[in-house]
Amino acid sequence: MKRVVIGICLVLLIVAGVSLISGRAQDASAVQQPPSNSVPPLNPLRVALLRWYRANTTTRFKVGNQPYGVAFDGANIWTANSGDGSVTKLRASDGELLGTFRVGGGPYGVTFDGANIWVSNLGGRLAKLRASDGKLLGTFAVGSLQGWMSFDGANIWVPHGNNTVTKLRASDGKSLGNFTVGNSPLMTAFDGANVWTTNTGDGTVSKVRANDGKVLGTFAVGSRPFGIAFDGANMWVANDYDATVSKLRASDGKVLGTFRAADLPYGVAFDGVNIWVTGLPFVVELRPSDGKVLFSARDDGGAGIAFDGANIWVGEFNDKVVGKL
């Protein structure tokens, strides 16, 4: 009988313990769950690399003179060095210099097509380099004042001249059409179906259907729009003369907000969580939901910007370096 009583007591203690633990777990869950509109403080890949903090200075690597365009090819960072007619290739993991390649003229934008690097040129011909070794595969006449390009999965889109964006087949550089957009298009971005151009001369952006070049709309933003990026639902545009960034709904071009950024904002990138904007003298990180500045770091002459999956890279044309955050 004594053993039975002891057994019953043990069972009751276990049941009570399980109930207590379950109740505490529910309480903890209720306390720890973030609100539905919260934004993670760090990109998960930075956490995986034990980068738990954001440094307020950048690690810098020497490249060519006046690095404007910056692009990531899946393993390496490329910069277009306008001041000396070259592009630089750095290993993204540690910044080791892997090569400097001459392209001539004034290289400005740099874009990766999955196998090759395309370099636009302010004073010459568009260049195509093999990403593995930097070999020049061809140059193509597109027009003067070529801006930053974008790749739509099959074609390269090049803004240039007074009001034109050109579509080139990436495999061989054949021109597939010239399409009229706004005044002085400078930079482009692809949203999965359409190509967007920033038109610096009239403070607008144009939305162009990628499959046939039809202009689907032209939308007013701020003064002298430069950089542009897609966050999966919206387009973000840096308005250089206004020190602002505009958020537009990609589906219909409606302006959802205009937010203060650094002075002279230039390039824009999305890191999978937040928006980054280069400027003078800072690069800033913005929360997409409301445009709040979450972080800023010194940026001496920031221009191009790219995300490598874990870190942000910024071309600092005043110092002949690229910074890694």
Image (spheres, helix red, strand yellow):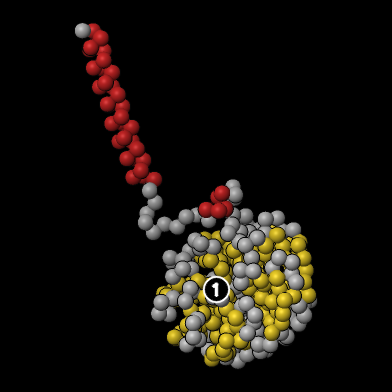
Which percent across, then down, holds residue 167? Answer: 58, 84
Which percent across, then down, holds residue 248? Answer: 45, 76
| Quadrant housing the N terminus | top left
Q: In this view, does 233 lie to the left or right of 182?
A: left
Q: In this view, does 47 lie to the left or right of 256?
A: right
Residue at the limit of the structure toward the top, as seen here: 1
Above-or-below relation of 2 to 141: above
Q: Is residue 162 visible?
A: yes
Residue at the image position 62 percent from the left and 77 percent from the top: 171
| Quadrant housing the C terminus | bottom right
Q: Mark 1 points at which residue?
A: 153
Which percent across, then down, holds residue 256? Answer: 41, 74
Query: Quadrant of residue 93 in the image?
Result: bottom right
Residue at the image position 69 percent from the left and 76 percent from the top: 128
Residue at the image position 67 percent from the left and 64 percent from the top: 77
Residue at the limit of the structure toward the left, as seen here: 1
Amino acid on which disc 1 is placed: Gly
Query: Quadrant of residue 103 in the image?
Result: bottom right
- Badge 1: how crowded within 10 Å, few (<14), some, or many (20+)? few
- How many numbered badges does the structure rendering display? 1
Query: Quadrant of residue 323 in the image?
Result: bottom right
266 or 97: which is nearer to us?
A: 97
